[in-house]
Image (cartoon, coloured by chain):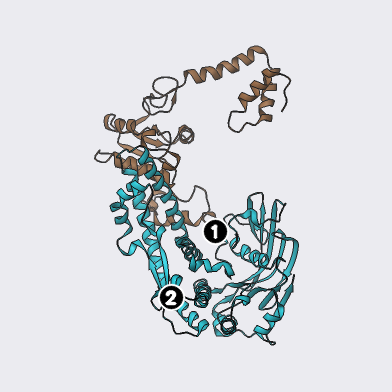
Chain colours: A cyan, B brown
């Protein structure tokens, strides 16, 4: 076994020892164990490599990373699935099971039903790096907001509560704006209440997002330079209406626009983050290679941020990434993830030899061949 | 379901319009009625028909009533300076069942929710305003659900009544009675600590 250095004595290692899948995606049933620090899942295309990673992710967050529809996680033609995994949490074994049947989901710890899913969130963390994640850089702002929200919701309970409250109030405010366009009452009393609620939650969310980005940037910059070997200056600009004036003022002063378009135009629900390399936009000007390095750095920084906040090391899930990386970046990535500050790694690849060659002969890797 | 009688089928159809009643339950009820004496069934249907025709809504509080004014509003023994604002008639029944409240009620008939198309004009707020102004109400107790919609309604009413000398209170929120702390959800517990009360509300240690 590898010797855990100082870093690891502060951060407990949370690992998954084995997993059992029943009617999950393409698995009728199957049990897999992960005994080594690095597990490599190999097999031809369509054999279910990614599904196995997704099952591990599912047990950590009780949802799929790849599909928003729970029904998609069920094996074709079946009406439910079960995923069960043995984790080690703070030195103790814990069996987490998730059962999904006809739209009803149940989550158990050591056989006892969780009353609320939120009690489970934050206990086990996992970070996935998958080929489609490039969307985070190339696509619209909604994906980036979801990404930041998912990190902050895991580490700050109040953030999650306030975010959910904000979204519900926003729905009511927008519905109110629509009603006003059909039947203007001239009575803005309800609006006053919605504005006050949105301003309270919005200010908190804005503050937390600002703090987050300030703490996240040094991690991101460090990982980017390690991966690319380059010297580019990394910046992440938090683009938010709140920087210009407070939420309460936006809601009040922008009312006529809001009424005309029947929705709330300004607020933290419009926030975005602009990624920059040497002061030009990553999305529009960076090369594919630079984007790739940036994406990996984002995910690694997410990993480190979560480990610092939660005081334990997440499980790192790498989906089919060796194919997409050149030799230099691959070596840099491996140095990082096998160094201190990183824990259990599960990865998929079509070729076992490639992974063996990349990690070197002395690395303890368990191979699962599908 | 296949019926040999159109009469039975119609009756089943009617019963299954009620909430919580499916076709099978409806059939059971119809068959039971079929077993009963004709006179008894008349009594049954007359009670229903009479209820629907004769029930009125109280002109003051909008509660169900047998007359122009309901039994609660008409009761001289009740404290008419206190009015408890509730969402619907079910809430009146729930609070009455506690036998701890001796004031009057005001039934709003819903709570403000633009998403469901419910605005102030759908609720009995104008009559509340009038009642507070004209009838010497001293205290308004808001007994509405602690949700965004409930809180919006509380805010709305409080703003409408601004400028009128009146005490507006809201029912306590927090740890339920007889509840144990470890089972309380974190949000409730956090709010209960933030809105804590002096112990005099519960025990008296003075004069001991």
Any part of residue B208 in sight = no
SS of the residue under disc 1 = helix
SS of the residue under disc 2 = helix
The residue drawn where x is 53% and y is 73% is A299
Q: Percent position (x, y) of residue B7?
A: 67, 17
Which chain is home to disc 2?
A
Looking at the rendered structure, which numbered label has been put on residue A109?
none
Q: Nearer the viewer, residue A179 or B109?
A: A179
Q: Is residue A179 above or below residue A87?
A: above
Q: Are marks 2 and 1 in contact (CB under 8 Å)?
A: no
State left or right for residue A11 relative to residue A353: left
Any part of residue A120 in sight = yes
Q: Percent position (x, y) of residue A162?
A: 43, 57
Which chain is home to disc 1?
A
Residue marked by disc 2:
A217
State left or right for residue B105 relative to residue B33: left
Q: Earlier in the sequence, mark 2 or mark 1?
A: 1
In the picture, the quarter occupied by the N terminus of chain B is: top right
Q: Nearer the viewer, residue A285 or A37?
A: A285
Mark-to-mark CA distance, 2 and 1? 28 Å
Looking at the rendered structure, which numbered label has been put on residue A118?
1
The residue drawn where x is 30% and y is 33% is B129
């Amino acid at each position: 076994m590898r010797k855990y250095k100082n870093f690891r004595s502060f951060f407990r290692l949370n690992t998954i020892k084995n997993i059992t899948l029943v009617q999950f995606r393409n698995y009728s049933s199957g049990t897999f164990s992960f005994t080594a620090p690095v597990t490599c899942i190999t097999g031809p295309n369509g054999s279910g490599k990614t599904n196995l990673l997704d099952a591990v992710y599912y047990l950590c967050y009780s949802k799929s990373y790849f599909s928003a529809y729970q029904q998609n996680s069920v094996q074709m033609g079946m009406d439910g699935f079960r995923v069960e995994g043995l984790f080690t949490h703070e030195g103790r074994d814990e069996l987490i099971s998730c059962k999904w049947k006809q739209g009803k989901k149940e989550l158990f710890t050591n056989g006892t039903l969780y009353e609320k899913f939120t009690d489970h969130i934050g206990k086990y963390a996992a970070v996935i790096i998958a080929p489609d994640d490039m969307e985070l850089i190339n696509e619209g702002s909604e994906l980036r907001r979801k990404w930041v929200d998912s990190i902050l919701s895991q580490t700050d309970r109040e953030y999650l509560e306030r975010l959910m409250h904000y979204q519900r109030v926003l729905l009511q405010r927008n519905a109110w704006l629509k009603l006003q366009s059909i039947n203007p009452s001239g009575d803005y009393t309800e609006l006053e209440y919605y504005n006050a609620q949105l301003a309270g939650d919005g200010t908190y969310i804005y503050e937390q997002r600002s703090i987050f980005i300030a703490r996240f940037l040094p991690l991101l910059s460090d990982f980017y330079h390690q991966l690319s070997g380059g010297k580019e200056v990394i910046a992440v600009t938090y683009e938010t209406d709140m920087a210009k004036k407070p939420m309460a003022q936006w809601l009040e002063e922008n009312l006529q626009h809001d009424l005309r378009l029947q929705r709330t135009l300004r607020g933290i629900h419009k926030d975005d983050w602009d990624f920059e390399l040497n002061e030009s936009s990553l999305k529009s000007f960076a090369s594919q290679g630079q984007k790739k390095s940036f994406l990996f750095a984002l995910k690694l920084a997410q990993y480190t941020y979560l480990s610092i906040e939660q005081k334990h090391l997440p499980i790192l899930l790498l989906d089919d990434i060796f194919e997409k990386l050149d030799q230099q970046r691959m070596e840099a990535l491996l140095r990082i993830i096998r160094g201190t500050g990183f824990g259990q790694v599960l990865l998929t690849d079509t070729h076992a030899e490639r992974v063996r060659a990349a990690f070197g002969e002395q690395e303890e890797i368990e191979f699962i061949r599908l | 379901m296949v019926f040999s009688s159109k009469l039975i089928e119609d009756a089943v159809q009617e019963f299954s319009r009620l909430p919580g009643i499916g076709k099978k339950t409806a059939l059971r009820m119809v068959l039971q009625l079929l077993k009963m004496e004709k006179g008894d069934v008349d009594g049954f249907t007359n009670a229903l028909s009479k209820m629907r025709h004769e029930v009125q809504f109280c002109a003051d509080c909008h509660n169900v009533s047998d007359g122009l004014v309901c039994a609660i509003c008409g009761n001289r023994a009740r404290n008419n300076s206190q009015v408890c604002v509730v969402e619907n008639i079910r809430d009146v029944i729930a609070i009455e069942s506690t036998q701890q409240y001796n004031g009057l009620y005001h039934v709003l008939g819903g709570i403000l929710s633009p998403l469901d198309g419910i605005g102030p004009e759908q609720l009995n707020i104008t009559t509340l305003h009038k009642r507070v102004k004209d009838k010497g109400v001293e205290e308004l107790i808001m007994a509405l659900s602690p949700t965004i919609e409930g809180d919006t309604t509380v805010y709305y009413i409080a703003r409408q009544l601004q400028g009128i000398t009146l005490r507006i209170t809201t029912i306590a929120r927090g740890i339920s009675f007889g509840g144990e702390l470890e089972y309380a959800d974190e949000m409730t517990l956090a709010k209960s600590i933030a809105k804590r009360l002096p112990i005099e509300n519960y025990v008296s240690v003075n004069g001991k």
